[in-house]
Image (tube, coloured by chain):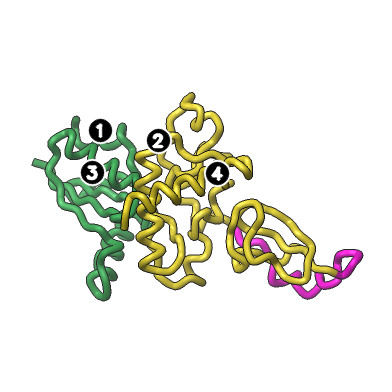
Chain colours: A green, B yellow
Amino acid sequence: MKKIKLYALSTCGWCKKTRAFLDDHYVKYEYEYVDLLTGAERDRVMSEVKRWNPRLSFPTIVVDDTEVVVGFNEDRLREVLGL
Amino acid sequence: MSSQEAQKLYERLKREAEAAGYYLNPDVDFVLDLMEGLLTNEKRYGYWSCPCRLAEGVREKDLGIICPCDYRDADLDEYGSCYCALYVSEEIAKGERKPQPVPERRGTMPKPPVEKHEEELVGFTKSGIPVWRCKVCGYLCARPQPPLKCPICKADRDRFERFA
């Protein structure tokens, strides 16, 4: 089972589409709504996202701590997740 | 927050967009979610920060990503939609094409050397009246101060820059 981490914003339409896509394909994932975090926790997660995606844009999907998909790119997600 | 509020905002933005030659995404459910996002950000920060970008919560720092953002027109030209796909091209509005994810443009545009020329430009116009440019839609007007709201895209006064 791949380890999938989704960094998202609670207000973002593309992030919502990404979650719906993962749910539709029965993909298990952890997610973090970065806009809902505050203080040190927010800083920590922001630097986590920046490590994978320096532009700090959302959604950012990290797979197995090795691959990253920036934005809701269905083709890339299918490829990386083997769907 | 009621979805009735989102519906009202949607109708208003659609009307304003169409009056100014812009189009909203024809996927109404998607747009209503974005309206909820705008309303959430208005409550959180006091302004319409882009729902698809992480706001800092300080107006001056988020100025460029207040909807409509400084990057909308460039992204419409290049990708057919703005970053969050609220605003789309006519082609997408008609359903002839689907919006695609747009890469983040923020931070990649070269800054025009406005500061350097500011002094030189004083009195540039024949009348001596300064010209102001809306950074969102490019609207130009010659008047002592920029308008409170851009008559084209409704951006606030602080989104204007001195043009001449």
**Residues behind callouts 3 and 1 on a single chain:** yes
Q: Determine if residue A30 is in view.
A: yes
Report the residue marked by disc 2: B27
Q: What element carries label 3?
A: helix
Pointer 4 with pointer 2, Cβ within 8 A: no
Q: Nearer the viewer, residue A4 or B164?
A: B164
The boundaries of the magenta stretch are B110-128
Q: Which amino acid does label 1 sit on?
A: Glu
- Which percent across, then down, holds residue B90? 56, 32
Report the residue marked by disc 4: B15
- Which percent across, then down, holds residue A63? 20, 46
Q: Mark 2 or mark 1, which is nearer to you? A: 2
Q: Which amino acid does label 4 sit on?
A: Arg
Q: Mark 1 or mark 4, which is nearer to you? A: 4
Crowding at dot 1, Cα within 10 Å, few <14 / some 14-19 / many 20+, comes out as few
CA distance separating discs 1 and 4: 40 Å
Report the residue marked by disc 3: A19
Q: Which mark is residue A79?
A: 1
Q: Which amino acid does label 3 sit on?
A: Arg
Letter of the chain that mark 3 sits on in the rendering: A
Horizontally, residue B26 falls left or right of residue B156, namely: left
